Structures are given as structure tokens and as C-alpha cells.
């Protein structure tokens, strides 16, 4: 197939998505308004000629349509329903497969009439809508999607897997791998850390980066956490997997999420998940069985949940076994992408 992809070329999700189809022998072209440095496929960065994001995207339509005609795709794939989904629906080619990345339906759609109009147009024009959580599938269908496929952005089991022998240090490690943006609210973990350290010697590692980093580092220092709280920045997948394999507890304090690849990576590597109460998290975590779902967003509640997990070796061992099975059954990247590829082939053939 010849697959034309519209998406943010700077995102890891876009690189994984396009790279998969390239590895499978398809011809892929990526069109992006963001950086395409490091793209695994041929890519072109588009120029926006108007000041706002929406008008900027629309101002590039003549170039987009020319690129579409030149490439002659068998299928158009849009990663994100707003913005990229809109220009993909206007590029002049079909069939269109539009993929929700979560915040388009969970955050953008309810935020304004303009976002709702854009996303409804894309959902109603798309020949296939791909989601990665039940909550997204329901929202997409309610907003007009006719054909919805749920496929998870899973993990690469060659990288993310349990250690041959579990090696937790005497000082247990608590890890967050979320990026440092307001939506992920890593500050909640920073505030909970002193309460945990009052009762248990532990260390904390944050593997992520973003605009909140400087503020969080200052807050951690002000709380006297300098020798227990490390901000490691973004790590390559192999290094990240190594950190997770040595972690006792994985914490996600996100305010909004679809299926979190970070959570799946932690589950695959054997860290015990403590996560906020979101519909997509409950699709993976049964509270008290293979992780903990926080009763409310509160530093003391988070601290108590982490301490309870650290104090129950049997629970963490049982969760590791159960999570390994869950990931093998439905959380693997290639298994999910094979389903997407099959759906693409059917669309292109029709």
C-alpha cells in the first residue's frame, strides 16, 4: 500500500506508527507541520502561512493537495482527530483512517464549539476511526463515527519485559515515566514523597521532561528531597526499561489519559502500578489485584497507596504475574498493529 500520513513528526507515536508500515514493506509519506527530524519514513514539513493553528493548517491546503496528487495514496492516515484529521479529510483522497490520540476527544472536543465542529467532521467523513480505549470508542461513536476499531498503542516486548531475576534494592524505587506537563500532574508525587519518606526509606525517579521540570525541581529541593528525588529526563527505551525493571512501584498521576503506553511499559517490566482513577486506567488495572487505583487526587492518598504496596510483597508478586499475562494477551505493539494493517488493507482494497 501507499499510505499518506498526516501527523506531528516530532512525536514518538508518529514515528512508531509510520515506522511500522515502512518495516512491513509499504510506501509511506509523512506530512507534518512540526519537525520531521529523525522520521523513519520520507517526510515533508509543511509551512503554515497564517497566525492561528487552524488557519495555518488550512493555509497549507494547496500544497497538501499537490503532495497528495503527486504521491497517489491508496489510503490516508491521520494521527489526531483535530487539526491533522481536518486537513486529511480535505486533502482530496480517500479512504481516510483517523486515529484518536486521546486528548482530542477527552480534552479538545468538550472545550469549544470550534473543536467539536472540526472533530465531528473528521469522524463522519472517516472510513475508519481507530481508538485505544473503550471510553474513546464510545465518545467517537456518539460524535458520529461509523466504523470504529480499538487497537492499543502497545509495547515492544523485546525491550519491555520482566528481569530474569527480580532485583529490588533495599531502598525501594518509586518511578514516574510521565512527561512534565500540567496534564500529568507529577507535582502530586513530589508532594506525596515527604509523607512516604516519613515512614519508609525510598528513592524516587522521574523519567520525563517538559515545561514543568524547573518548577518541580525547585519544589522537590524546597521539600528537602534533593538526595531522594532524581529527575532523569527522557531516556531511550532500553534505559527506561532498565529503570522500570528495578522499580518497586510505578506511579501515574495523570489528570486525563487514554490507554497509557507508559503504564503498559511499567506493567510489562514488573513494577506495581499506582494510577489515578480514569476510565482508560481501569481498562487495565483492577484495584487491589494488579495495581492500585487512587480513590482521589490527594498527596496523602497517594502516599498511603504507595506505602501499602511497598509493605505487601505478596501483592506485588501476584500483580507482576497477572500483568505479564495481560500484556501478552492484549498489550503488544505488533499484535495490535497487525489488526490495524489488516483493516487498512481492506479499506484500500475496497
Image: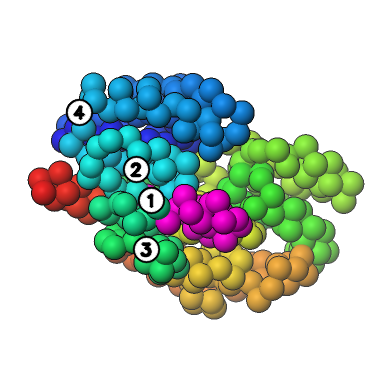
State the residue position of label 3.
144
Per the model, the C-alpha gap separating discs 1 and 2 is 6 Å
Q: Total label count?
A: 4
Per the model, the C-alpha gap separating discs 3 and 4 is 28 Å
| Magenta stretch, residue numbers | 99-120
Per the model, the C-alpha gap separating discs 2 and 4 is 15 Å
State the residue position of label 1.
122
Q: Residue at x 31, y 41 (%)?
A: 77
Q: Secondary structure at mark 2?
A: helix
Q: Residue at x 48, y 28 (%)?
A: 59
Mark 2 neighbour density, 10 Å: few (under 14) some (14–19) many (20 or more) = many
Question: Do the residues under discs 1 and 2 have CB atoms within 8 angstroms?
Answer: yes
Question: Do the residues under discs 3 and 1 have CB atoms within 8 angstroms?
Answer: no
State the residue position of label 4.
72
Q: Compared with residue 57, is residue 310 higher up or lower down, i.e. above or below?
A: below
Left or right, 92 with respect to 173, comes to left
Per the model, the C-alpha gap separating discs 3 and 1 is 9 Å
N-terminal-most mark, 3 or 2: 2
Q: Nearer the viewer, mark 2 or mark 4?
A: 2
N-terminal-most mark, 3 or 1: 1
Mark 1 neighbour density, 10 Å: few (under 14) some (14–19) many (20 or more) = many
Left or right, 239 with respect to 332, comes to right
Amino acid at each position: 500500500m501507499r499510505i499518506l500520513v498526516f501527523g506531528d513528526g516530532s512525536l514518538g507515536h508518529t514515528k512508531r506508527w509510520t515506522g511500522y508500515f515502512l518495516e512491513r514493506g509499504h510506501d509511506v509519506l509523512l506530512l507534518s507541520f512540526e519537525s520531521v527530524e529523525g522520521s523513519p519514513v520520507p517526510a515533508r514539513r509543511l509551512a503554515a502561512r497564517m497566525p492561528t493553528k487552524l488557519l495555518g493548517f488550512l493555509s497549507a491546503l494547496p500544497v497538501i493537495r499537490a503532495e497528495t496528487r503527486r504521491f497517489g495514496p491508496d489510503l490516508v492516515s491521520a494521527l489526531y482527530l483535530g487539526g491533522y484529521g481536518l486537513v486529511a479529510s480535505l486533502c482530496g483522497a480517500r479512504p481516510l483512517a483517523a486515529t484518536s490520540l486521546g486528548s482530542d476527544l477527552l480534552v479538545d472536543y468538550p472545550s469549544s464549539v470550534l473543536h467539536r465542529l472540526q472533530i465531528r467532521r473528521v469522524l463522519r467523513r472517516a472510513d475508519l476511526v481507530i481508538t485505544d480505549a473503550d471510553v474513546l470508542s464510545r465518545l467517537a461513536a456518539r460524535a458520529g463515527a461509523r466504523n470504529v476499531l480499538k487497537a492499543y498503542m502497545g509495547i515492544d516486548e523485546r525491550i519491555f519485559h520482566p528481569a530474569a531475576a527480580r532485583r529490588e534494592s533495599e531502598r525501594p524505587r518509586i518511578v514516574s515515566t510521565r512527561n512534565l506537563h500540567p496534564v500529568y500532574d507529577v507535582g502530586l508525587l513530589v508532594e506525596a514523597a515527604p509523607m512516604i519518606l516519613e515512614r519508609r526509606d525510598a528513592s524516587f525517579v522521574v523519567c520525563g521532561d517538559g515545561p514543568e521540570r524547573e518548577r518541580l525541581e525547585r519544589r522537590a529541593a524546597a521539600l528537602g528531597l534533593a538526595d531522594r528525588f532524581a529527575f532523569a529526563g527522557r531516556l531511550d527505551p532500553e534505559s527506561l526499561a532498565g529503570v522500570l525493571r528495578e522499580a518497586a512501584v510505578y506511579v501515574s498521576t495523570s489528570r486525563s489519559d487514554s490507554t497509557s503506553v507508559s503504564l503498559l511499559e511499567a506493567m510489562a517490566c514488573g513494577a506495581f502500578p499506582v494510577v489515578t482513577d480514569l476510565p482508560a486506567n481501569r481498562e487495565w488495572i483492577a484495584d487491589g489485584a494488579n495495581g492500585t487505583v487512587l480513590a482521589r487526587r490527594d498527596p496523602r492518598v497517594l502516599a498511603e497507596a504507595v506505602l501499602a504496596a511497598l509493605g505487601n510483597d505478596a501483592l506485588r508478586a501476584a500483580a507482576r504475574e497477572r500483568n505479564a499475562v495481560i500484556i501478552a494477551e492484549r498489550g503488544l505493539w505488533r499484535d495490535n498493529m497487525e489488526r490495524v494493517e489488516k483493516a487498512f488493507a481492506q479499506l484500500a482494497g475496497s
